[in-house]
Image (cartoon, rainbow, N blue to C red):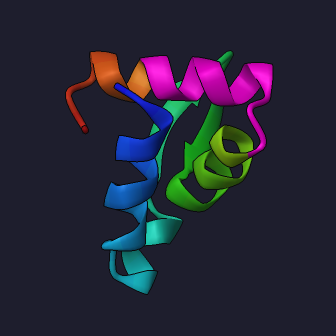
Amino acid sequence: MSKERFLKVYANLPEPERKQIIAIIDDKPYSWDIAYSEINDDTPLGKKILKKIEDLGLL
């Protein structure tokens, strides 16, 4: 999964859906909105979230 694919999917999500939890990393829940911020900024957490949602088959 690439960052670009995530950003494309995120851009097409309805606003309410962006608040939904999509991943739990280190016992902390992350929504599409938080994932977007972390992945867009290329943070280490963003890379973990991207891998997790790939593994879950969300993208």
Q: Is residue 4 left or right of residue 29?
A: left
User: Magenta span covers which residues?
Assistant: 41-51
Q: Is residue 59 left or right of residue 28?
A: left
Residue 28 in the magenta stretch? The answer is no
Question: Which residue corresponds to the image point at 34% horizontal and 82% vertical from the top-left?
Answer: 14
**Residue 33, image x, y percentages:** 60, 61
**Residue 29, image x, y percentages:** 60, 39
Question: Which residue corresponds to the image point at 52% horizontal and 68% vertical from the top-left?
Answer: 19
Screen quadrant of the N terminus: top left
54 is higher (above) or lower (below) than 29 = above
**Residue 20, image x, y percentages:** 44, 61
12 is higher (above) or lower (below) than 22 = below
3 is higher (above) or lower (below) than 45 = below
Question: Which residue corresponds to the image point at 44% horizontal and 20% vertical from the top-left?
Answer: 52
Among the 4 quarters of the image, the one containing residue 53: top left
Question: Which residue corresponds to the image point at 60% horizontal and 46% vertical from the top-left?
Answer: 35
Q: Residue furthest front?
A: 4
Among the 4 quarters of the image, the one containing residue 8: bottom left
